[in-house]
Image (cartoon, rainbow, N blue to C red):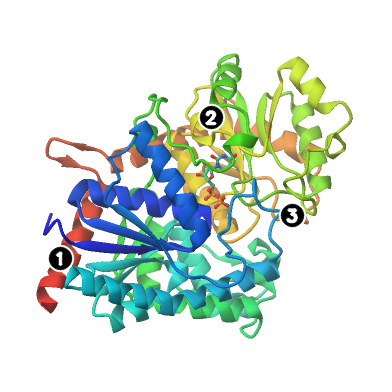
Amino acid sequence: MGDPQEHIVMFPFLAIGHMIPFLALAKKIQERTSYKITIVSTPFNVKYLSSTIAKDSTKQVEQNPNNISLVSLPYNSSDHGLPPNTENTEALPLKDMVTIFNSTLSLKDPLKKLILEIIEKDGKPPLCIISDTFMGFASEVAKSCGTSNVSFTTAGAYGTAAYVSIWLNLPHLLAIDGVFKMPGFDDSCCSFSVNQLHPFMKSANGSDPWSKVLKSLLSPSFDSLGFLCNSVEEIEPMGIKAIKNLTKLPVWCIGPLLPQCMLKKGEKDQIFEPSIGKDHGLSPEKCISWLDKHPKSSVIYISFGSQNTISTSQMMALALGLEESEIPFIWVIRPPIGFDIKSEFRSEWLPKGYQERMSKSQKGLIVKYWAPQLQILSHNSTGAFLTHCGWNSVLESLSQGVPVISWPLAAEQAFNSKMLMEEMGVCVELSKGVSSVVAKEDVKKVVDIVLGKSGKGKEMKEKANEIGMCIRGAVKEEGDYKGSSVKALDDFIVTLLCRRNVSS
Ligand code: UDP
């Protein structure tokens, strides 16, 4: 499509959960256009991305990504790529996150310098800069360099709309009886509750460090050409409408950005795994052979993503609740909040004799630090996913028709959980945040509901299956048929080319 010499620059936020969808999007664009793509990040992240690309191309999972270049921008202090917690210490304190968000602003001038160098080399501006919604300042860079900017949200539409809306409007400050409407969301739809907010959101008042930094990073994204969203049009109508209402911009849902093999249910080979963390976990083969021994839809998979962990008391309650429920589980476990992730896992963080009991009875597979999540979710024996509701985890679960038990911990995860419960009907919330008190009885209660073969459990499974079919259908391309996400990506590229033609 268009001149194969076109060049797109991509600029993800610094966390792994953002970089993986950016890399997947780069590959998708290349499959359809052969354009040159340059992904720009900090030296730490470029190192991570290059090892991922190298690993991927040796496995020949996706198209040979020769045309994807990686460029490091000079970055101050200790280079906060946000690695998954296998290399980092415990969940980053919130004040450090504010520092990291603030420090991304220092990438603005180096980004501009790079774009000017590209213009000199290519003899024309890149077709566009696709920047993370959190890197809004890229729209100013694009404008000053004569190119377009498109904002890419790696989160879902509902979560993005709610998150952006809350930081740009602080609507909870006007809550009556703890309930408020979120600007952008139709009046007729859901209300939000102050209880659904993370503590750092509740205390935001416009002059605190979070409000200031997020406003300065998010609001310039409204000055872009439109929003790319790692979601599927059919599954998030309310969220998509809310982004459009808020930004007055087009939204292209081009997700889910998962490996193709995940999207053809049943094919489990050649699955892409991020290289970080692999050495600390259990081999995919061991997890799969453990799952093979359990009946269909009987196992709960538990993981809190790449960055998060829970508190010691929560870990203890979760362990006891799982044991009492007698449901088989795979649990990706990390040292709790307050401990160095690199340290050896201590048995005292779990009930006495727990690991031995679980292993002997084959009831629980405890995986330290990192598990092959994609393979586990696509296995027939997996019946539910207890997740922090990071958007990649949500998409991975739903694409395989696996219902969710939610325990949101940070960012927009509480909004994702709310949508999964209220809009999709595929989720029950167990807890929220790292300070909540969780009783072992609560664990048993939700597990019994979600894995129930009748009533709510059955309904949730049916809905998750329907959504899974929509997600897989969105990326299908057979003969003349194009799924909604395939069409949206083509439409996005045509829009860029039209804009190029108009301005040249
Ligand atoms: N992941 C994994 N194994 C683990 C933990 C996480 O493969 O033990 C992957 C997971 O499949 C997902 C990503 O890491 O693709 C986590 O992204 P998500 O958006 O769910 O959460 P985040 O880590 O950004 O909070």
Quadrant of the drawing holding the C terminus: bottom left
Q: Is residue 432 left or right of residue 316?
A: left
Left/right of residue 300 with respect to residue 420 in the rendered view: right
Left or right: residue 121 versus residue 332 is left
Q: What residue is shown at x 67% (from left), y 24% (from top)? A: 328
Residue bearing mark 2:
376
Residue 477 % position (x, y): 21, 38
Query: Does dot 3 land on a helix, a strand or a loop?
Result: loop
Q: Residue furthest top?
A: 293
Q: Secondary structure at mark 1?
A: helix
Q: Earlier in the sequence, mark 2 or mark 3?
A: 2
Residue hosting label 1: 497
Task: Identify the residue position indicated by label 3 in the image.
Answer: 434
- The one nearer the camera, 367 or 73, is 73
The structure residue drawn at horizontal position 82% and vertical position 39%, both measured from the top left corner, is 316
User: Which percent across, then down, holds residue 54?
Assistant: 40, 42
